[in-house]
Each structure stands twice: as C-alpha cells, then as structure tokens.
Image (spheres, rainbow, N blue to C red):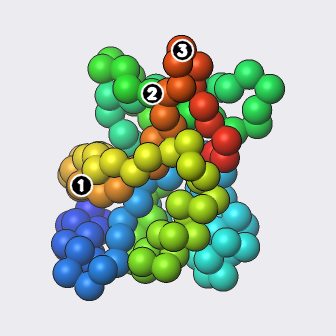
Amino acid sequence: MDSASLAALASLHSQQNLHTVFVYGSLMADEVLRILLKRTPQSSDAVLNGYQRLSIKKRVYPAIIPVDSKKVSGKILSGIKDFEMDILDAFEAVEYKRIAVEVSLKFGEAISLCLCLGQRKGSKLVWRLGF
C-alpha cells in the first residue's frame, strides 16, 4: 500500500473509531497479532524519528525512549478497532502509556497515529511486554 493510501486510510479510521498504531517489538510479528486479534491487520513499514530502541536487562523485548538524534524502525498497523485497542493495551500492560506521534512511511510521507510508550519509574525504565 502506498503512503497516500495509508494517510487516507488513517484519516478515514479516525472518523470510524478505527485506529492506526505504530509497533516496534513483538507486535510486528504476524503470529503474535493473529493470536491476540484473531487476524492480521494491514501493515506497512515505518520509522519513528526522535526515539531510540533499547534492550532491557533480563528481558527479551525492547523499550523505546525519546532521543532527538535517533530513530526506530517498525510497522504501522491500520484498521484497529476499539476492542482490539483494548486487547493491545492489555498485552502491553499498565507500564505503557499511549501517546500520539508522527511516523515516516517508507515513501517519505508522514502520518500521525498512536504509540504505546514505556513509562519511567524512578531512574529505571519499566517495560513488561514488547512491541
């Protein structure tokens, strides 16, 4: 799907309570999405500028933090329904917060969407489940 189609789709989704989400860890895997959502949403490669992916000590999934000069490769998932957002939120756990971000698509166009970001507790980044 080209970037113009994805941008139009994201705009349409906001009118129909459908969501477009940037993922950067285990939710990039179709197998994980099929287990959670019972389907594989439409997706496209994307880049989130101004963030860095980090490994978490004694964990198998990544975290991301804001870092101006860095970028994170991932995917955007489109057509996510409200109840599916609830499933993804439960998968990500309470240590995440959902924020609006702008990502760059493969073809250079930017699109605004949701991202689940790990929250800091004290000086330690808490990341329980990985996207």
Q: Which residue, given by chain and number where applicable, does mark 1 sit on?
A: 112
Q: Amino acid at mark 3?
A: Ser
Q: Earlier in the sequence, mark 3 or mark 2?
A: 2
Residue 64 locus on image (x, y percent): 50, 32
Q: Nearer the viewer, mark 3 or mark 2?
A: 3
Q: Residue furthest top?
A: 123
Q: Amino acid at mark 2?
A: Ile
Rate crowding at label 2 as few (under 14), some (14 to 19) or many (20 or more) other CA atoms within 10 Å.
some
Please determine whether, in this image, residue 72 is positioned above or below residue 94: above
Q: Which mark is residue 71?
A: none
Residue plotted at (53% across, 60% down): 89
Query: Which callout, 2 or 1, points at the residue further toward the start of the chain?
Result: 2
Q: Residue at point 32% right, 33% down?
A: 49
Q: Residues within 10 Å of mark 1 (few under 14, many from 20)?
A: some
Q: Nearer the viewer, mark 1 or mark 3?
A: 3
Residue 5 percent location from the top left of the image: 25, 72
Whole-percent x, y for residue 71 in the image: 40, 30
Distance of label 3 from label 2 (alpha carbons): 13 Å
Which label is found at residue 65?
Answer: 2
- Nearer to me, 20 or 82: 82
| N-term-proximal mark, 1 vs 3 | 1
- Is residue 5 visible to us here? no
Give above or below for 68 relative to 114: above
The residue where tag 3 is placed is 123
| Secondary structure of residue under mark 1 | strand
